[in-house]
Image: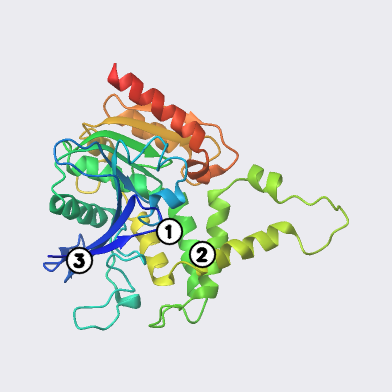
């Protein structure tokens, strides 16, 4: 393996680095990824045997710069403060942010693009595990993730029951639902309607991905969100609606920072999530979790409804369930930082007694 330090970003406490595992990664499909690259970011200082490690697993279109997409939760003066914690977040494989993915070169120098192999949540966790061992992190005090990030954190806690002391799952589930898979397939259909989507290019399928993001946004928010933020004051208007411009804006916003090949792969990886695969059932798999667990649901979540979080809490031994009221639907796990922080403070206080 080769380690490349990439320096310090604008936030002086955050460092990014890349590890190259020349032995590659054997994927759940049986295919060998011939070389595994993991880009990750850290905040704070790691002292073996002494540091309180917080491992954040990011969601579908996020990246390792956790303080940028979870402001108020991670950073100086926040609940997870690099003054008191060693915080780490790794870009998942199939990402377009530096870890092995469609924009990575093959060993022969050619680019993968649409030929990158299919990955699952379990493959992402295996990559995290290789990084953890490389960094000589013997235990994780808190592993936290929302949505697809929660799927990773949960799977890791099942694979390594003695590794994680506190498991925090936000707006996530034990297996992806038919409803969630249907939303993902609808997005992929929009991408596939773009004739450029499967061309060997970094900018392939951008119109399709913009449409896919507009579809996804409907599942991330709620009726009430749009009613509150996109309603019209002029009842005589017959065109130029706020809701229309908002959908176009959000679609283009993702196009400006993401990649269509990655979008296709990661949505399929989310579909693959089922902790019961090869373990008898989801309930049997959840019974393997030993971590102290807090499961948080969002009242208005349409994509990962609270029944899914209640199922987790029901089948994980002595897990706690909490629910936040939010206008913002699934995105509440990113937006409602103050409410989540208070829940977590109370949880840690109870755990310390």
Residue appearing at x 71%, y 51% in the figure = 230
Quarter where residue 265 is shown: bottom left
Query: Which one is earlier in the sequence, the residue at label 2 or at label 3?
Result: 3
| Mark 3 lies on residue | 36
Counting from the top left corner in percent of width and height, residue 66 is at 39, 50
Q: Do callouts 2 and 1 mark residues in contact (Cβ within 8 Å)?
A: yes
Disc 1 element: loop
Residue under pointer 2: 254
Q: Quadrant of the N terminus?
A: bottom left
> Does the residue at mark 2 contact the one at mark 3 (Cβ under 8 Å)?
no
Which residue is situated farthest in the front direction here? 12
Q: Secondary structure at mark 2?
A: helix
What residue do we see at 48% from left, 76% from top? 205
Secondary element at tag 3:
strand
* Quadrant housing residue 117: bottom left
Q: Tell me where residue 41 appears, x and y as whole percent.
A: 30, 54
Q: Is residue 199 left or right of residue 48?
A: right
The residue pinned by badge 1 equals 61
């Amino acid at each position: 393996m080769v380690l490349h330090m990439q320096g310090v970003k604008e936030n002086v406490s955050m460092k990014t680095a890349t590890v190259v595992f020349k032995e590659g990664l054997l994927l759940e499909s049986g295919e060998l990824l011939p070389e595994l690259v993991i880009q990750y970011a850290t905040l704070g200082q790691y002292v073996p045997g002494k540091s309180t490690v917080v491992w954040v697993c990011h969601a579908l279109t996020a990246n390792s710069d956790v303080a940028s997409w979870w402001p108020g939760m991670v950073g100086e003066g926040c609940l997870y403060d690099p003054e008191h914690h060693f915080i780490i977040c790794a870009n998942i494989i199939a990402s377009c942010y530096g870890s092995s993915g469609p924009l990575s070169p093959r060993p022969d120098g050619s680019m993968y693009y649409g030929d990158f192999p299919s990955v699952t949540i379990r493959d992402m966790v295996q990559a995290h595990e290789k990084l953890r061992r490389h960094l000589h992190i013997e235990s994780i005090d808190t592993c936290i993730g929302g949505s697809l990030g929660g799927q990773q954190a949960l799977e890791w806690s099942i694979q390594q029951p003695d590794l994680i002391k506190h498991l925090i799952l936000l707006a996530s589930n034990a297996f992806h639902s038919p409803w969630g898979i249907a939303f993902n397939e609808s997005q992929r259909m929009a991408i596939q309607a773009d004739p450029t989507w499967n061309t060997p290019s970094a900018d392939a399928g951008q119109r399709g991905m913009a449409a896919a993001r507009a579809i996804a946004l409907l599942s991330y928010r709620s009726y009430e969100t749009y009613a509150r933020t996109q309603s019209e004051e002029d009842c005589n208007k017959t065109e130029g609606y706020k809701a229309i411009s908002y959908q176009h804006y959000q679609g283009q916003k993702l196009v400006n920072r993401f990649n269509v090949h990655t979008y296709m792969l990661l949505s399929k990886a989310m579909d693959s999530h089922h902790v019961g695969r090869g373990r008898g059932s989801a309930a049997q798999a959840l019974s393997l979790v030993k971590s102290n667990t807090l499961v948080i649901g969002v009242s208005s979540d349409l994509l990962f409804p609270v029944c899914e979080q209640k199922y987790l809490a029901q089948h994980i031994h002595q897990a706690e369930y909490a629910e936040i009221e939010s206008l913002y639907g699934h995105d509440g796990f990113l937006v409602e930082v103050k409410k989540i922080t208070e829940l977590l403070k109370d949880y840690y206080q109870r755990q310390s007694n």
